[in-house]
Image: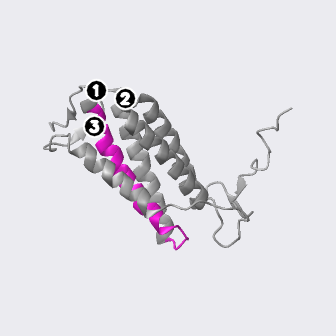
Amino acid sequence: MSAKIYTKTGDKGKTALIGGTKVFKNDIRIETYGTVDELNSHIGLVTDYMPDAHQRDILKQVQDRLFVIGSSLACDPEKETGMHIPDLWEDDIVLLEKEIDGMNESLPVMKNFILPGGHAAVSSTHIARCVCRRAERLCVNMQQQELFIEPLIVKYLNRLSDYLFVLARFTARQLGMAEVVWKPR
């Protein structure tokens, strides 16, 4: 028999950080890593729609890095975790920058604002971008509250949202879809 998925320990609105500290489920740290988890789920959907094999591989790496970020955010910085938590590296950011630059070479210069839409692959990528920006804002909020957060996390999420924007444009182009240009009334 497998272990039960429910423990009932959270029935009163609390959960434990890695390290054992109990906090309410609406704690900013929980909200932040929950948003990173939501982003990771959206990246999974983007990967499922992605027509480009190379970008699917990059997105799988992004999912790994989001687990790294979530693990870091789930730790109580005041306590020893007793386990190895992987680190984010500057090279992770450099990879996103190289991908952005490579895709941008094949894209026309933007002359208008672009609306999400035109194809499920494009729209889901824009949704992931928006969730990424929310995760970034929550991380910045943690910094402003002087809660510990690894410095590369904000930088990575900032670059990831840029990558997702360019990926949406790149995907539209690969699918032969015209970008949905915003035409104000």
Residue 5 image-quadrant placement: top right
For the point 75% across and 51% down, the residue is 12
Asked whether residue 89 is drawn in magenta, I would say no
Q: Is 129 placed above or below 171 here?
A: below
Q: Which residue is mark 1?
A: 175
Q: Is 146 placed above or below 50 here?
A: below
Residue 77 image-quadrant placement: bottom right
Badge 2 vs badge 3, beta-carbon distance below 8 Å: no
Q: Which residue is mark 2?
A: 51
Q: Position of residue 68 (x, y in %)?
A: 56, 55
Please tell me whether mark 3 sits on a helix, a strand or a loop.
Answer: helix
**Left or right, residue 4 beside residue 113:** right
Using the numbered discs, state the Cα–Cα distance from disc 2 to disc 3 in whole angstroms: 10 Å
Return the disc, 2 or 3, that comes first in the chain's sequence: 2
Using the numbered discs, state the Cα–Cα distance from disc 2 to disc 1 in whole angstroms: 8 Å
Please tell me whether mark 2 sits on a helix, a strand or a loop.
Answer: loop
For the point 30% across and 49% down, the residue is 100
**Left or right, residue 69 beside residue 97:** right
Range shown magenta: 145-172
Return the disc, 1 or 3, that comes first in the chain's sequence: 3
Badge 2 vs badge 1, beta-carbon distance below 8 Å: yes
Tell me which secondary structure the magenta stretch mostly adopts. Answer: helix
Q: Is 156 placed above or below 60 here?
A: below
Q: Which residue is mark 3?
A: 170
Quarter of the image for the N terminus: give it: top right
